[in-house]
Every structure is written in C-alpha cells, then in structure tokens.
Image (tube, rainbow, N blue to C red):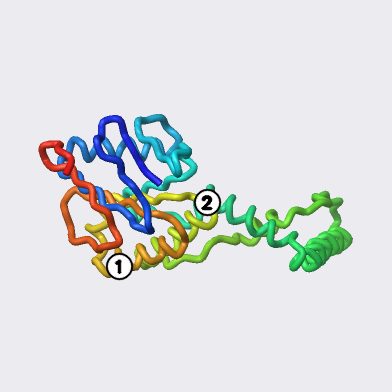
Amino acid sequence: MKLVHPDLERQIIFENNKNCFWIIESPKLFAKYVNGLYLQSEGGSGGFVLSDYDKELDIGKNMEVIINPFDISLNDKKVINKLYAELSELAYAEDMYVQTQEITSKLKEYIMQLEYLSPYMLEFELDMAVDSIFKAIGLKAAGCTDDFYENMNIYIKIVAGLMRKKLMVFINIGNYLEKEQIEQLIKTAMYNEIYLLLIESTLKDYSNEFSCYIIDKDGCEI
C-alpha cells in the first residue's frame, strides 16, 4: 500500500508489515499536508492518493486521521452504527437465531401485558429489530475513560475491525506517548492488520518496524 501526493517526490510506502514515520520539520508544509490528509479522510477532495496493489482506495473510507488523541470517541455515530450492524448479523446467525427470536417474542408479550394492565391502547412495532433493543439499553463499546492510551489501543481495533479501514494516521503522537507505548500501538495495529502513519514535526527515536520519510525545514525531502 502507498500514499502519494503530486507535490511530493517520494512515495510513502507501507509494505512487509512496516509502518511509517513522516517527519515534516517545516511548519508551513506540516500544516499543508496534515490539513490535506484530514480533509480527505473526512470525505473532502485533495491531492493525496492512497492505493493498494495499484488500485486506488477511497481515503474517506480507508483512512482515519487522529489529530488530538484526547478527542477519540469509541462510540460516535459511525462506530455505533457499525457495531449494531455487526451485532445484528451475529444475532440472526445460526448460533444465536433461536435466542434472538425468543427475546423479541418475550418483549412483545411484555408490552401486551403492560397494555392489559394500563388504561391505554398501545402500539408498537411487531417486527422488532434487534438493533432497536441495543439502542434501548444503551449498548456501546466499553473503554477506559481515564486512560486515553488504552482507549487508543481499543480504537485501533474498532477502526480495523468494525470500520474496515486500512490506515490510521496519528499527528504528533510522540508528544503524548513513551517509546514503549508507541511500540505497543504498533503491535496492536499489526495484529489487527492495519497500518500506522505517524506524522511528527521533529525527529524522534523510532524502531525498526518503521520506515522513515523526512521533509526538512527548507522543504527538502530526505
């Protein structure tokens, strides 16, 4: 898999399970490329092209950009919708189908008993979808509310497993995590078959699991 831009001479290449560090020392170019990646990851247009085996990939569907790790939400609308869809498939699969039918049947009986005991005529959906039950009980992915690093590991699993994305981009994550923690993120990403691109404004120590691309203060690619 590779990431290219018409203004860049080098291609950022992800291969052989190697993730990438991209050091951009020029503040002007740092803002330009980070902003461009973020806008495209949100569905906007731009100059970056992400491809896999020469097949162009939709950046909005295949890339997640994390600018502020403290803003990571394990249960935003996109995640919840994907979670409910996957759990619904499990609920109606062979192993759980009978139990799912029993639960929805019991809920219908429960509502009918409430109607009998109340002075009101009630209406409800006879074809009760299991995802409406998930919503009613506030089902969501569990996280560690006081540990953003653990939440990042969980979020990598969610982005790879639920959202089926191929690349996660972290901006200046080295300002928040120790080297050992970054190495653990690498392991989490590799296990979940998703690549990491760490964009930093200054050169930091990095492991052999990373390829390194540098744009210096003068805008020269190294």
Q: Which mark is residue 181?
A: 1
Q: Considering depth in this image, is 105 or 6 the residue closer to the camera? A: 6
- Relative placement, left or right, of 74 versus 48 is right
Q: Residue 168 carries which label?
A: none
Q: Considering depth in this image, is 165 or 190 the residue closer to the camera? A: 190
The answer to which quarter of the image holds residue 162 is bottom right
Looking at the image, residue 100 lies above or below residue 41: below
Residue at (29%, 50%) from the top-left corner?
171
Looking at the image, residue 27 lies above or below residue 7: below
Q: Is mark 1 on a helix, strand or loop?
A: helix
Furthest residue in direction right, as rendered: 116
- Residue 191 drawn at (x, y percent): 45, 65
Looking at the image, residue 125 lies above or below residue 17: above
Residue at (33%, 55%) from the top-left corner?
19
- Relative placement, left or right, of 200 versus 115 is left
Mark 1: amino acid: Gln
- Residue 140 drawn at (x, y percent): 56, 60
Residue at (27%, 49%) from the top-left corner?
199
Mark 2: amino acid: Met
Q: Is mark 2 on a helix, strand or loop?
A: loop
Looking at the image, residue 219 lies above or below residue 110: above
Q: Which residue lies under the disc numbered 2?
A: 163
* Residue contact at pointers 2 and 1, CB within 8 angstroms: no
- Measure the C-alpha gap from mark 2 to mark 1: 23 Å
Residue at (30%, 52%) from the top-left corner?
20
Q: Considering depth in this image, is 187 or 45 the residue closer to the camera? A: 187
Closer to the chain start, of discs 2 and 1, is: 2
- Residue 115 drawn at (x, y percent): 85, 58
Q: How crowded is mark 1: few (under 14 residues within 10 Å), some or many (20 or more)?
A: some
The answer to which quarter of the image holds residue 185 is bottom left
